[in-house]
Amino acid sequence: MSDKEYRGCWPTMITPFTDGDKVDFKALRAIVDQYVAWGCEGIFAVCQSSEMFLLSRQEKLDIARAVKDAAAGRVKVIASGHTEDEPAAQVEGLGAMAETGVDAVVLVSNRLAKEAEGEEVFRRSADAIFSQLPGVTFGMYECPYPYRRLLTTEFLADCARSGRMVFLKDVSCSRPVLEERIAAVRGSGLSIFNANTATLLDSLVAGADGYNGVMANFHLDLYVWMYRNFRERPEEARRVSDFLTVAAVIEARAYPVSAKYHFGLTGIPMSLRTRVKDPALLNENARLEVESLVRMERGLRAELGLAG
């Protein structure tokens, strides 16, 4: 396992809403407690799973503070909320996020250059933010919305050498790319977190520092078990990886509505309301699939000797 400061299995925080479309802070605090009970070492708040593109700036800041307060020093909390287009607005929003007290502020790679713009524009935008917010600890997220912009290995290597970033949420979904990135930052304080379940186990073997993906909202404790045991119990870890990979297909079923339904089934009641998906998309068949997943999770936990 990684000995870096940023490591382990980190959930992507969902935002529970009331039926009146307000942030449900009671449910949010209960989710944080569940994450911690499952064994996370950090939480990524105000991210795409949080519906950050549809949150007001005040909501973003309030959520980040609430997650940080609920974590109460038990685990790290990082946050993004980096959705603005204009450079000045980005610096203002990122600076405000840093003032919430989160451990790191996460840049969104596609906010730093338009899809048709090249690496020079991206680098110039990143350097401007780094220089205008010199006291802020940064991470980076290759958010797939509105388009996926993967970082170059050269940029990552430069950030590793300079210490400008401590965290990358990798969404390449590619073993060769992950292996190249892991090699490029080896020996530095820059941690590589894989968001993709299918490549996760192999990336951990190659030296990745952890997992940061949406399926942590369903069964984070199983990811934690694999992370902690993949070296000493490789055959069991592969079996757990196979389960997690197939289970991750449910991400395509109206997420994050499906995650909210799952939380409701497993002890944290909340509305299925979201701002990105109509709850009606989680039809009868999709609900039955989530219910089947809950039963399968329980069976695997019993085999592994996990509580819950």
Image (tube, grey):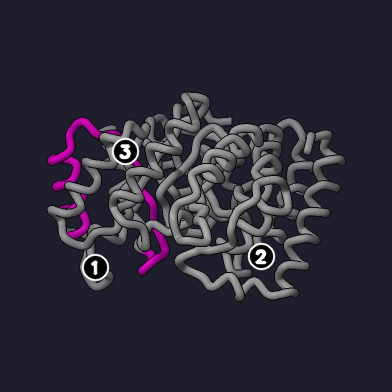
Query: Which residue is most to the front?
Result: 20
> Nearer the N terminus, badge 3 or badge 2?
3
The residue under label 2 is 249
> Nearer the N terminus, badge 1 or badge 2?
1
In the image: residue 70, left or right of residue 303: left
Magenta extent: 121-148
Q: Badge 1: few (under 14), some or many (20 or more) residues near its Cα, within 10 Å?
A: some
Q: Amino acid at mark 2?
A: Val
User: Secondary structure beneath disc 3?
Assistant: strand
Foreground of the two, 96 or 132: 96
Q: Residue at x 53, y 30 (%)?
A: 2
Q: Is residue 8 above or below residue 109?
A: above
Residue 230 placement (x, y as % from top left): 69, 37
Whether residue 235 is in magenta: the answer is: no
Circle on res. 125: none
- Does residue 206 appear anywhere in the picture? no
Residue 124 placement (x, y as % from top left): 15, 53
Whole-angstrom CA distance, mark 3 to mark 2, is 31 Å
Q: Residue at x 43, y 59 (%)?
A: 51
In the image: residue 90, left or right of residue 264: left
Count of residue discs: 3
Query: Which of the 4 image quarters holds residue 253?
Result: bottom right
Which quadrant of the figure contains the C terminus? top right
User: Secondary structure beneath disc 2?
Assistant: helix
Q: Amino acid at mark 3?
A: Met
Query: Which of the 4 image quarters holds residue 21?
Result: bottom left
The residue under label 3 is 165
